[in-house]
Image (spheres, helix red, strand yellow):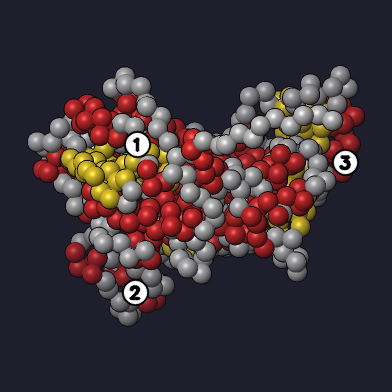
Amino acid sequence: MASVGPAVQGTLDDLGTPLAGVTFVVVDLETTGGSAKEDAITEIGAVKVCGGEIVGEFATLVDPGMAIPPFISVITGITQQMVVAAPRIGEVLPSFLEFARGAVLVAHNAPFDMGFLKAACAAQERPWPAPPVVDTADLARRVLTRDEVPNCKLATLARFFRARVEPCHRALTDARATVDVLHGLLERAGAFGVESLEELTGFQRAPTPEQRSKRHLADGVPAAPGVYLFEDARGEVLYVGKSGRLRSRVTSYFTASETRRHVREMIGIAERVRTIVCASPLEAEVRELRLIAAHKPRYNRRSRHPERAVWLKLTAESFPRLSIVREVRDDGAAYLGPFGSTRTAEEARAAVHDAVPLRQCTQRLTLRLIETRRAATCALAELGRCGAPCEGRQAPEDYSRHASLARRILEGDVRPVVAAARARIDRLAGELRYEEAAVQRDRLAAFVRGAARCQRLSALAGLAQLVAARPAFDGGWELHVVRHGRLAAAGTVPPHAHPVPYVEALVATAETVRPGIGATPRASAEEMECVLRWLDSPGVRLVEVDGTWTCPPHGAESVRQWIESAAARPDSRKVDRAGRPMR
C-alpha cells in the first residue's frame, strides 16, 4: 500500500489578489477624433481607487498639436482656445504613467483609450508598460442582461448604477462616473464567483454559459470555404456569415474571442447552424450578400437592405431636372448611382447644380404651361440662382444646352463639375472661408465617388460574359464566370490539371443572365463590387471577355485619387486651395 504524504495547507497567494486590495486607475480620454493614428488626445482624466475609496485624481488638458474639429468641440466643450496654453502629450505622458504605475487600468471601451495611450507612447519612443486592463463595457455585457439595460453606453450604465456624477464627455467627470460603474459591476461579478483580480481577468476572457452550452452546434461543420446560417428553433435565419474555413469560424462563436453583445445574444437563441460549402471565397462572399438580402437576419448589421440605394436621375421631359429616385427605369433618362444614402445623393446633386444651371423645382414644366404663364415660380428664381424657364426668361434651346451638358456629366464626363468645384474651393480658400470651401469639397467628393462607382459597375454590367482565374493556395486555380455583373458560376481547377476542360464545363453550366438597364441590372452593387475587388486582386488572369470593358476617358477615376486625398480627413473642416485639409 502506498504511503500518503502529509497534507499541505494552501497559502494566501494561491487564492489570488483579492479585489479589495487591488489599486485601479480609471482613465478617460477626450480626443480630436476616433483614429489613434491620425488624431490626438485633448484631455486626460483619471481616478485612482483602492478598496472602494478614491485615493487620487489626475486631470489635464492636452494641446493636440492640430485643429479640434468643430463637431468635436460641440460634443466635448473643449475648444481650440482652451488647449492653446495646455502642455503637449510629451509633457503629460510621463506624469500619467507614474500616476498609474503598478495599478490596473480601467476604461469604458478600453480599446479606444488604450489605443491612444499606446500610440502616444510609441510617438514618444516610450515602452508601453502593458498593465492589466479592465473594460467596463465588456464587463457589463457579461453581467447585465438586455432586460436590465438597453445598451452598455457609459451614460446608460451610470444611470443604472446611480452614479454620483453624470457623464458629459469631459475626461475627469466621465472617469468619476466610470468608477461608480466599475464598483457596481464588480458587485455583480461577485455573484459569478469573481473575488480576485485573477478571477476577474479570467472572467473577462471566458465564454458565457450560453456560448459553452451551444458548442455542439459546430459539430460536423466542414473545414472548407462557404457560408453559415444560424437558425432558431422555428428555422428563422438569425445571422449569416462567410469564411474561408467554416469549421474554425463557427467554432470561434463559442469561445471567449467572440465579445459582440448582439452576437452573444443571438447564440443564446440559435438552435442549429446550417452551412453551404462554396467553391471559392468569392462565391462565399457573394452568397452571403444574397442570403442577407433575402432573409434580412435581425442580427446582421450590414447589407440587409440593398433595395434602399438611391439614384440621381436627369428626368426625360421638356425641361429636365435632377431627381433622386429609388429605381432605374427604361425611360430614356440618364442615371447616376447607386448612392448609399439620400444625403450623399443630395450632395452629389448639389455639385452638379453648382456646375450646370438646371432648374431645381419639382413641377413638371411644359411649353404650354410656360406660354400660358401658369407655371409657378420659386425663391431661387427671385434670388437669381435659376434661369427661370418657368417664367420664359430662358429660351427652351438655351435650357436644352444645359440639359445636354448635365446628361454628358451623368454619362461619364466629370470635368465640368470638377472644374466648377475646384474654382469655388480656390476662391473660398483664398478668402479664408474654409468652412464653405469644405462644403464644396464634400459635395465634389460625394459626386466623384458616386460617378466612379457608377462607371465601374456600368462597365462590368455591359459585359455579356467574363471568365477569369486566380491561383489557389493548393496550386490549382479558382475559376469564375460573371455575366452582366452577376456571378454566374464558380469552380476550381485541381493542381497540374489542364484548365480548358474545366473552363468549358463551368461556362456550360453557368447561370443564364439576361441584360438589363442601369449600372446594376442583375446584381446588387455590393455583389458587383466584390467581383471587381476579386478581379483586381494579384494573380487574376482574364480567360474570356465578351464585350468592351472600359471606363470613360474623362470619367471619375481620373480624379478619384485626388479627391480621396483631399477628403482623407472628413473631420477637418479647413482646406487649402487644392482642397486638402489644413492642420
Residue, x 71% and y 39% (percent of image)? Answer: 248
State the CA–CA distance, disc 1 to disc 3.
67 Å
Residue occupied by mark 3: 508
Residue 297 spot, x, y in % from top left: 64, 61
Residue 103, disc: 1
* SS assignment at label 3: helix
Please name the amino acid that badge 3 sits on: Ala
Viewer-nearest of labels 3 and 2?
3
Judge from the rendering whether residue 504 lies leftward or rightward of residue 299; answer left or right.
right
Judge from the rendering whether residue 335 lies leftward or rightward of residue 439; answer left or right.
right
State the CA–CA distance, disc 1 to disc 2.
78 Å
Judge from the rendering whether residue 111 lies leftward or rightward of residue 531; answer left or right.
left
Residue 528 spot, x, y in % from top left: 63, 45
Residue occupied by mark 2: 370
Q: Nearer the viewer, residue 274 or 160?
A: 160
Residue 58 spot, x, y in % from top left: 21, 41
Determine contact: label 3, label 2, CB under 8 Å.
no
Residue, x 38% and y 70% (percent of image)? Answer: 362
Q: Which sits earlier in the primary sequence, circle 1 or circle 2?
A: 1
State the CA–CA distance, disc 3 to disc 2.
58 Å
* SS assignment at label 1: loop
